[in-house]
Amino acid sequence: MFTLRTSNPLAALFLIAGLVIASGTLALPIAWALLAILAVICIVLLPFSPLIALVVTLTLAPLRSLISTESSLSLPLDIGQILLLVYLGVWLAHRLWRRDALIKPQADAPLLAVFGLIAVLSLSAWNSQSLSGWLAEWLKWVAIALLIWTLTVSVDEAWRWLVFAVLVSAFANALVGIYIFFGGSGAYHLMILGKFFRAFGTFGQPNPFGGFMGIALPLGLMVAWSQLPRIWTGLRSHRRAPHLPVLIFSASSLLSLILAAALVASWSRGAWLGTAVAVMCMLIALPRRISRGLALAGVIAAL
């Protein structure tokens, strides 16, 4: 699991700074306070792994729409771009400090695929009607390539932090979405059932919010499912469940329930359908034999 040991002398300073910042969140509205507390947790953990910055990035990057519509804060770049640059800087500084390799010896298929797409998109610049629009889209794929590059080089720990980052980001947005659903919006054009509001989290629109919940929910369910064999093995061997798998199972199960509630609160039929298809695909891939997975998915679809 995650390694939180560190000899970094800045760890204590980060902890003290995090506690000071956390105390200041008490004066914020509840939605902003929840996001701020999650960000502080990530900042406190930052000295332990540079990938913690990825958690901060994925958690706060969706605030772009909220900042542009509800805040007078003026930023030279949108918050997602700023946080991505911060993450890349933290990751690079950490690798250089530890004198770790910056390039992976063997090629990685997803990274090569993105590089190929970037090369193809580069050719379309000559026929683009808006060079600035083309450049904005092209840079997005360059950013994706950089993100994949950092994760493939940090392969020993990257996948755990990536799962953690996606779930933390989704959890933060789900809390904001549920708060909006019960009246924290004021967007009367999104009113449903006479007294509730379609949840949109920090995305500003219910549909992309629902899509994000639909992406994260299967991930949370699989994290919970992955702990069941470890719990069962502990019960059979020692007649008691190991504490860490039980904790992970309980936390991921509760998180999945919250994500499911936020998905329903989005009132996005497209997101509901997409999530149903994703869960169906998971059921097909779950058993070792594909025939059993297809049978299981067929039975559930029939029900």
Image: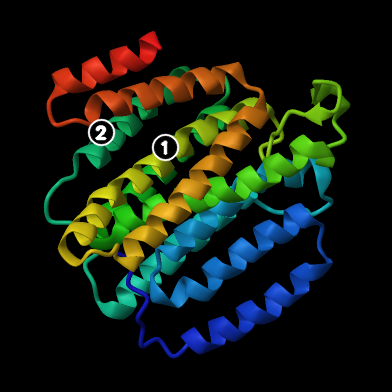
Q: Which image quadrant: the C terminus?
A: top left
Q: Give amino acid for label 2.
A: Ala
> Is residue 274 rendered to the left or right of residue 72?
left
* First in residue order: circle 1 vs circle 2: 2
Find residue 144 and report its horizontal and vertical position in percent: 40, 42
Label 1 residue SS: helix
Quadrant assignment, res 174: top right
Distance of label 1 from label 2 (alpha carbons): 11 Å
**Residue contact between numbered discs 1 and 2, judged by CB atoms under 8 Å:** no
Q: 60 or 181, which lies in front?
A: 181
Residue found 45% across the figure and 64% down from its top: 52
Location of residue 63 with respect to 53 vertically, above or below: above
Q: In this view, which residue lies farthest toward the top?
A: 302
Q: 216 or 225, which lies in front?
A: 225
Find residue 57 and report its horizontal and vertical position in percent: 53, 55
> Is residue 103 rendered to the left or right of residue 165?
left
Query: Is residue 165 among the parts visible in the rendering?
Result: no
Find residue 278 and report its horizontal and vertical position in percent: 39, 25
The numbered mark at residue 113 is 2
Location of residue 210 with respect to 277 vertically, above or below: below
> Is residue 148 rendered to the left or right of residue 46?
left
Q: Which image quadrant: the N terminus?
A: bottom left
Residue found 41% across the figure and 35% down from its top: 218
The residue pinned by badge 1 equals 141
Residue found 31% across the figure and 35% down from its top: 114
Quadrant assignment, res 83: bottom right
Within-10-Å neighbours for mark 1: few <14, some 14–19, many 20+ = some
Q: Give amino acid for label 1.
A: Trp
